[in-house]
Image (cartoon, coloured by chain):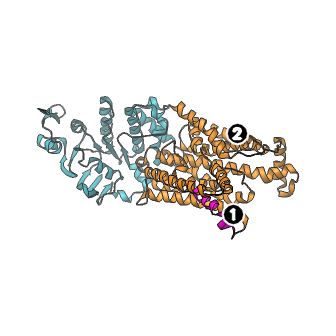
Amino acid sequence: MQKKQKFILLALGLVLGVVSIVALGMGAYHIPSADILTMLTQKLHLGSVEAVHNMQGDVLFEIRMPRLLLGLLVGAALGISGAAIQGIFRNPLAEPGLIGISSGASLFAVLIIAFETFLFTSLAAWIGYYILAFGAFVGAGLTAFLVYRIASKNGRPNVTTMLLAGIAINAFAGALTGLMTYMSTEQQLRTITFWMLGSLGGATWDNLRALAPFILIPVLILPFFGKSLNAFSLGELQADLLGMRTDRVKRWVVVLSTLAVGASVAVSGIIGFVGLIVPHTVRLMGGADHRFVLPGSLLLGALVLTLADVIARVAVAPIELPIGVITALLGTPVFLYILIKDK
Amino acid sequence: MLRVEKINYEVNGRKLLKDITFQVRKGEILAILGANGAGKSTLMGVLCGEKKPDSGAVHLNGKALSAYEPAALAKCRALLSQQQQMTLSFNVEEIVLMGRYPHYKNTPKQQDYKIVAETMELCGVSAFAERDFLSLSGGEQQRVHLARILAQIWDNPDALLLLDEPISALDLHYQQKVLAIARALARKGFMVVLIVHDVNFAAMYADRILMLKNGRKLFHGTPVEVLAQKEIYTIFSVESNVIMNPRTLKPYVQLEEMDIDLD
């Protein structure tokens, strides 16, 4: 990796660290950064959960910290999956949603919300949230799997067909989702809408612990595909000729992205644009080498989402805006600027 | 040594290659000639592993293509395709360095950088090293790809170089240069299989010529043996007059003009 690229990664990491500390302090209840650092070091030294009892501590560790960690995880997942999918499709405008992950997740979530009364009468209320998240995760996996199978001939996936199948499945799932919303009650509709626009508000240590592996593992494995994805940009035939085992690469990238993004959608709803603009921005900063773009997108994705969440919490405090709205509002002008400047 | 034995390839009931058999020795340049649809690109597809033949086998240096590990095969076979679409912007040196991927795991070695510098110099693209690949002209991009695939097999004189109409996008100077590079490599022991449309380029640079028609091998031999009026008419349906170049003792094919009357 070139010096400049290493420097950018380092800079991103540092900025991320600073923004994280600041983000922990911001919200309807403000905590000064100095206090945050004090409490964090206390926690690390004394090591026990009971160490900090005052209101600041509770807000920090029970509410803000899991929320920050979720934002970092989801942002990283969306960023790096976006970069990997763009590498596979050899298209800087591709993103994981294209292979049906988001629409599948949302369809299953909406189905569950719409039929909740039917389900929840027989189950305890707290299971409801987990069913929703699990359903979304299953939906993401099923649609991605379906798209992948449709596009594969003799076990070899064709990326163009994958793209087309993804578009078709997305449209279909979108139509079904629309139908469901039409049939929902007022309350259900509000839940659906809020879910479709994304929120990190559902972060708790419990669901973080449950979903972290599904996000962390893919996010940590994907950077190792840097060299393969570079070869991919030469075309699949050339990548094969360079000994890259393209079928294996395609399979792994789709599976890992589905896991990471599916799990993210399951916890935080649909958050758009991150997977699209983050990798593009990283490329503009330091070139297209995937060995740089993948980790860069991981860091920048985490950074962008953390910032977006701060805005979501602070802009009209104490009301929270859905984070998907923020990413779209900020993302669209940035995206358009990129497009225009690139000409 | 490249041994191609009884290759048959069929798609949707149409036989594109019928019982193709030939050999290419070390240090030999074989040019494949034929009209459009004769099966040249299909044959190249079989040689580069893109297409699996229905029957028959290809053996490279004594081993069937299917028996090779992908990484090992990458070190002894490289293909320069026709124009290639690239969408992500790498710089030129990064792309040529990709040719060395089969040779290093995570970090390129000194040797890799040296080879990349040599092939870029040979293909006249050293000046573009830091430039965005997408900003180059079609011909310049093609030369960068050539530098890359040369870098891929540069240090393996037993390797096979496949050139699929490599010069269509290039100007006269670089058309000749690419073929001269192929010949220089052949002198070092490399095997070269090349598809060209220009019969005279084949005559000048190839050691032997394979002529295909309707998926079948019709003629195979040295330029003197196979480039004659009758053979050229059979393969290309054009009238020609073949004379011998007294200096090089190679055939020169003069094409007769075609005349069409619209009344």
The boundaries of the magenta stretch are A104-123
Asked if residue B206 is positioned above or below residue A137 in the image, the reply reads: above
Disc 2 residue crowd, few under 14, some 14–19, many 20+, Cα 10 Å: some
Q: Report the amino acid beneath label 2.
A: Val
Coordinates of residue A322 in the picture (x, y in percent): 68, 47
Q: Secondary structure at mark 2?
A: helix
In terms of image quadrants, where is residue A181?
A: bottom right
Q: Earlier in the sequence, mark 2 or mark 1?
A: 2
Residue A211 vs residue A316, the one in the foreground: A316
Residue A164 drawn at (x, y percent): 45, 51
Magenta span has B113? no
Considering depth in this image, is A232 or A343 the residue closer to the camera?
Answer: A343
> Does any portion of residue A42 appear in the rendered image?
no
Residue at numbered disc 2: A15
Residue at horizontal 56%, vertical 45%? A83
Q: From where the camera sits, is residue B143 visible? A: yes
Kind of residue indicated by mark 1: Gly
- Chain A visual colour: orange
Mark in front: 2 vs 1: 1
Report how far apart the C-alphas of labels 2 and 1 lie in the structure. 38 Å
Chain for mark 1?
A
State which chain disc 2 sits on.
A
Tell me which residue sits at (54%, 47%) in the image. Answer: A95
In the displayed structure image, the side of residue A255 where residue A202 appears, left or right? right
Q: Please, which residue is most extreme toward the right here?
A: A54
Q: Nearer the viewer, residue A267 or B24?
A: A267
Left or right of residue A214: residue B84: left
Chain drawn cyan in the picture: B
Q: Nearer the viewer, residue B153 or B131?
A: B131
Q: Which mark is residue A128?
A: 1
What is the x, y in percent for residue A223? Answer: 58, 49
Circle 1 SS class: helix
